[in-house]
Image (spheres, grey):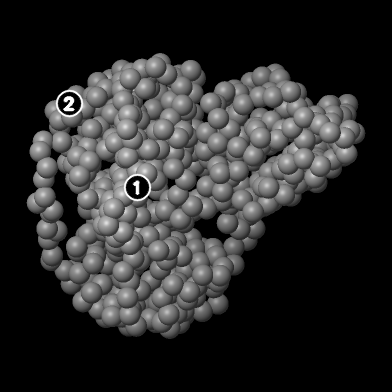
Amino acid sequence: MPSVSSVLVKHLSKWGITHVFGIPGKPVTPLVLEMDNVGISFVLSKHEEGAGLSAAGYALARNTLGVALGTAGPGGINMLTAAGQALFSNVPVLFLTGSPPIRDIGKVLGQDSTMFGTDLVKMFEPVTKFSARVERGELLNSYLAHAMEHAFTGVKGPVHLNIPADVLLEQIDDFELTLPDAYPTTIASNLDHVATLLAEAKRPLLFLGGALHALGAYKEIEAFAQKWALPVTTTPGGKGVFLSNHPLHLGPYGLGGNALSEAYIREGVDLLIVVGSQLSDLEIPGFDPSIYPKHIIHFDHDSRFIGKAVPVATTPVLGNIRSNLRALLSYADITVAPRRMPDIFEMEDSHVTGDLLRGKQVMEILREELPEDTLVYGDAGSHSFYAIKYFDIKVPGTFYFEEVYATMGRAIGYAVGAKFGAPNRTVACLTGDGCMFMNGTEVSTSVNHDAPVLFLVANNQCIDMVDKGMERHLGRAVGTTYKAPLDGAKFGEALGARGYRCTTAEELRHAIQDAIRSNQTSVIDIIMDPKEIPPTMKRG
């Protein structure tokens, strides 16, 4: 009879998992050995948080399950942040943690993961869709089935199984599970009314959020905008779901927003169509009653946050967003005349301090030098809001940013995992010096496993968003700058990567070109103007 560990790993292999990310420890070594037996590469991460983030990046790039492995106690605890990030990004990741033998429960045990120590099952509950301990080998079949159903049905998300060391070695009857197809999606019952509202709107606006990334609904949302002749704006998390040069695209709104979308909203909107967003404070900062729309149509999978952020008459469209968009596209008898798009140009901030690189300039250079289909992962910080405002999207689904959970350093792990999931694509991580200080050692993971990523570090010697926000709104900034700033190039070199230090546009262009030609992990340290005010001040 096979062991629990061999049956579990057999399923991972059958489901097409090629890489598992983690840090081994005694309680989980049976899983690591079984992975090696079946040809699954175990990627030795530098921290369990990095492992969890890499698993999420892998899942996003391959549109499949990601798997992260952590040992008992603090090894599992270190993955909680990554699990929360996967939950808010709607990414299916299986977090596997270990525990000392369950037969010894109740004694004082090193790194105990049960109720007598640090109960990992309870800790993972708020940041996953399902969390359970497999206390007997015979439970693996049922618990693994439940975990995968939660991970892939409805809104996708992370799940957690804690398996004690002695349970991993138990012999059990073999079984076969397949990854579940999503349950038949529920179509909203009020689409006729929604279609009427869309057809009658005089000044509508389609407001797009990041959930469209998780759904991969790029073709559907473009067709929907065209059918109903809807001007489009994207939230920070919605960056990348719509082409920048599309005739209907006004550009971004919220933090990192532009003057065109701002002006359109201030001139009056009678119907706001919210798709893939729950209207966070980073998406609608400064959205006051004077510019409220007359009515909102809100597509969402549940009703928890509908009507909470903007108190106007709202028509919910509940159920699977992608399916409801497709259903509305079938209204062939309705045609909408093209709408006049506004003609307003952005006024650039003229405040320049010396010759240091600035956000707009850097984003334009990145766009010119990176291949159009480069997978770009934006980290938490000013650097990503410059990208939201100025980095053009030429292929939908090539820029990822999440603004609600907003883990600093997440893009570092996401990019590493994405390179394993899409080895033939150029993968770039847009991060900052603050994020690099947090999770930057995952550069070593990229180097050691020959998965070359471009790490683009916007270096302004501080925690920039907080620094500028405190100074602007509170009068002074405290605890936001580094006495010994990051030397990104040397940091990268110390971890085995190619290192570049760029202070001019020419140096930056050369570094990107050289890094791409080398096909090696590269850290490009971009020395930014530390006095530039980022496009994030609306939040207060």
Asked which secondary structure carries label 2, the reply is helix
Callout 2: few (<14), some (14-19), or many (20+) C-alpha neighbours within 10 Å?
Answer: some
The location of residue 174, given as percent across then percent down, is 83, 33
Residue topped by disc 1: 478
Residue 242 against residue 310 in the figure, above or below: above
Q: Left of 18 or right of it: where is 38?
A: right
Q: Left of 390 or right of it: where is 333?
A: right
The location of residue 92, given as percent across then percent down, is 58, 45
Quadrant where the C terminus sits is bottom left
Residue found at x 67% / y 47% = 124
Residue found at x 45% / y 35% = 438
Asked which secondary structure carries label 1, the reply is loop
Marks 1 and 2, how far apart at CA = 33 Å
Callout 1: few (<14), some (14-19), or many (20+) C-alpha neighbours within 10 Å?
Answer: few
Residue found at x 23% / y 33% = 527
Residue topped by disc 2: 507
The location of residue 39, given as percent across then percent down, is 64, 21
Identity of the amino acid at label 1? Val
Q: Earlier in the sequence, mark 1 or mark 2?
A: 1
Residue 291 against residue 224 in the figure, above or below: below
